[in-house]
Amino acid sequence: MSGAWMDKVEQQTRLAGHNRVAMLLFRLGDAQLFGINVFKVREVMRRVPMERMPDAHPLIAGSCDYRGQTIPVIDLALALGYPSLRDDPSAHLMVTEFSRSIQGFLVADMQRLVHCEGESLAAPAAALGFGTRVNAVTRVDGSLVAVVDVEHVLASLNATPTSLSAPMQRIARVHDLQPRRVMVVDDSVVARQQLVGLFRQMDVECVVAQDGREALERLQELAGAPEGEGVTLVVSDIEMPRMDGYALTRAIRETPALRPLKVVLHSSISGLFNESMVREVNADRFVAKFQPDVLAQTVLDLMPEQFDRF
């Protein structure tokens, strides 16, 4: 990414943590605009020479050298139902970092950096035809922008472990966590399924919300719930429509009835910036997606010895 791009990213950084999303816009083959959180983008460049990988997944266009590291290159156009960009010399390479892994995505062309109010992001209607690989839509200067659920794309390529290891399952059984309940907050269907499955292995019941606004409303409803029906700990994604994880954490800390809740931010965004924001909003922990044993141990560390209702 050029110095000019990085200057713009630095300006957008100051907006984070206030329910605003900085997005890099791009196209995949027609006029439709797509977006990705700019903090997941390392660099944007012209398409570079790639090595073929004959036995790879159909969405893998090949591999390339990125600053001395061999990384996979994913044909994002093909993943979203567009003609393949594998052999298009005019394509661009968008290098990203998700959960501390680096990969490139082929896109048709890059547009610009924008920031959006979190409340302007909404789940896409089925009639729009984006399917499950778009998890939010918004409008920028009157044009529809579809936010790509890159985690969903990556999940279709990688066999990410979703089960606890046998030793961790034994540790979880020693800690009798019932009747504690955990709230899972994530706009990704894949991520919600992974988290609910993990907590089921720990014999912990989940309350599920699809974004921060829904989570906050549900938490406020449960604040006066009978024992065993409340929530002890919140595991929340950061990037979400309407209200992001940073804003949700701020709201929890500013609400006296919710302030004692433990909050774990669970995201594929990594890096020093994110760690700083986690401290600023007073979250208890940050865990990168998706590390079942690490998340389970974090939950065990934060759960109180005696059941407390909030």
Image (cartoon, rainbow, N blue to C red):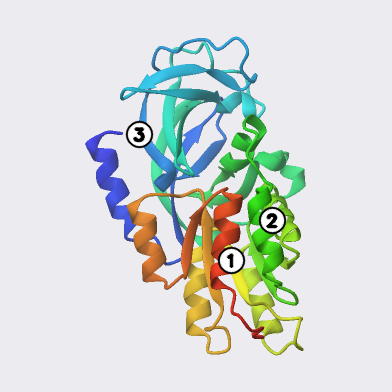
Q: What quarter of the picture does the C terminus occupy? A: bottom right
The disc, 3 or 2, on the residue closer to the chain's N-terminal end is 3
Distance between the alpha carbons at the discs numbered 2 and 1: 13 Å
Q: Secondary structure at mark 2?
A: helix
Question: Foreground residue, 121 or 256?
Answer: 256
- Could you tell me which secondary element the residue under label 1 belongs to? helix
Q: Which amino acid type is marked by label 2?
A: Gln
Image-based side of 261 in relation to 201, left or right: left
Q: Residue drawn 24% across and 39% down?
A: 4
Closer to the eye: label 3 or 1: 1
Mark 1 residue type = Val
Q: Hey, which quadrant is residue 55 in on the image?
A: top right
> Cβ–Cβ below 8 Å for labels 3 and 2?
no
Q: Which mark is residue 81?
A: none
Badge 3: how crowded within 10 Å, few (<14), some, or many (20+)?
some
Few, some or many residues within 10 Å of mark 1 (<14, 14–19, 20+): many
In this image, 159 relative to 115: left or right? right
Q: Which residue bears the numbered disc 2? A: 169
Query: What type is the residue that disc 3 sits on?
Result: Glu
User: Which residue is nearer to you in this view: 238 or 302?
Assistant: 302
- Crowd rating for badge 2 (residues with CA inside 10 Å; few <14, some 14–19, many 20+): some
Q: Earlier in the sequence, mark 2 or mark 1?
A: 2
Badge 3 or badge 1: first in the primary sequence: 3
Look at discs 3 and 2 and give the one toward the viewer: 2
As drawn, the label of residue 43 is: 3
Instruction: Identify whether 50 is placed above or below 12.
Output: above
